[in-house]
Amino acid sequence: MTKLTVKAIASHFNVSVSTVSKAIHDSHEISDELKRNIREYAKLNNYKPNRVALNLFNRNTKTIGVVIPNILNYFFVQVLYGIEKIADQRGYSIIICSTNESIEKEIKVLDFLSSGTVDGVIISTVLGETGLTNSNEHFSALLDRQIPMVMFDRVIEFIKCDKVMVDDFEAGYLATKYFLDTGCKIVAIINPLGNSYIGRLRIEGYKKALCENGIGPNDKLIVTINYQDDLELTIHSLLDFDKIDGILIFDELTLVKIMDIVQSKGYQIPKDISFIGFTNGELSKYVTPSATTISQHGKFIGESSADKLIDRIEEECDTCNFETRIIKTSLIARESTLKPKEYGKA
């Protein structure tokens, strides 16, 4: 069966396509009789509006593009949940795009989204991760088309848009201080985020906590890895380097894998080595022992980002004061760490 189009309806009534569109959308410019006839005919023939054509007619898609670097990261899953909740409440749909940590794919995705597909974009950018500051043309193109954008978590400071950020410096500081409060003396870091801005902030917080306790940071205890590295070999080398009694890991999946490797080598958690990871996801709750984590409040970040973007879309202002919102983190204590001294040793 041939799909009924606006053009076919226009031909049937011997009117313009514009007249049919106005009739379908109940425009006061069309007579009530013609509107009724066109709408009844469309309904009788199971007419379904072409969304793209409708968007062009209304200049409003009621759709938000959401761009994330890693669909498997539970933090981004939480953020998506928060975005979708607010978007649904405010009458918007979302298009989810994953860049898989590729700047080339990010450029292509933003080019697609800036073509009129969406009313606004929420993005955690690959550029924020790699620290690049000289390749921002794809953001400029988006903003030049007056498409509002909110950056979250991985942001680029010099891009003029609203931002929602985690206080990563404080998160690194609080996690390290908690290790020290539980009696740990030698704390290592496993960083799967590469040379990222957020990773550097967490490391700076870690170093501050060590220095406040009279411990000189040792860069050999800060190990940066990528997804191709042999984790077992990495941990073997790290544990051979010094008598480490605490490990801070910047990614939940890596945390669970390393806890398993360490236990397979005969170490007891947390008696021999304590662990703290980032993102309070399901894996952290149900791994054995359950993992102490830094909660980044991803759902709240998603809600805040979506509310800010939709406010910006509906304000329809060209020159506005942009806002950067900093979200505080929380430490969720579980079985992978000892109890702080003031509560007694485990």
Image: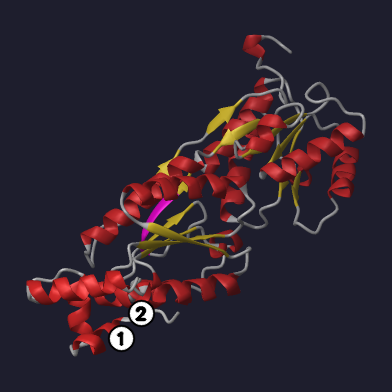
Identify which residue, 38 or 301, lies in the foreground: 38
Specify whether residue 241 is painted magenta: no
Residue flagged by tag 2: what amino acid is it? Leu
At which x and y percent is residue 121?
Answer: 41, 63
The picture quadrant where one finds residue 127 is: bottom right
Q: CA distance from mark 2 to mark 1?
A: 6 Å
Q: Of the numbered discs in the image, which one, if any, rests on residue 4?
A: 2
At which x and y percent is residue 109?
Answer: 51, 72
SS category of the residue bearing label 2: loop
At which x and y percent is residue 185?
Answer: 75, 27
Q: Are marks 2 and 1 in contact (CB under 8 Å)?
A: yes
Residue 31 appears in the rendering: yes
Residue 140 appears in the rendering: no
Identify which residue, 50 or 62, lies in the foreground: 50
Q: Residue at x 79, y 46 (%)?
A: 220
Q: Residue at x 36, y 61 (%)?
A: 161
Categorize mark 1 by other alpha carbons within 10 Å: few (<14), some (14-19), many (20+).
few
Circle 1 is placed at which residue position?
A: 8
Magenta highlight: main SS: strand
Determine whether 266 is above or below 324 in the image.
above
Q: If the image is split into quadrants, where does the N terminus sit? A: bottom left
The picture quadrant where one finds residue 35 is: bottom left
- In the shown orientation, is residue 97 left or right of residue 242? left
Q: Which residues are magenta?
A: 160-164
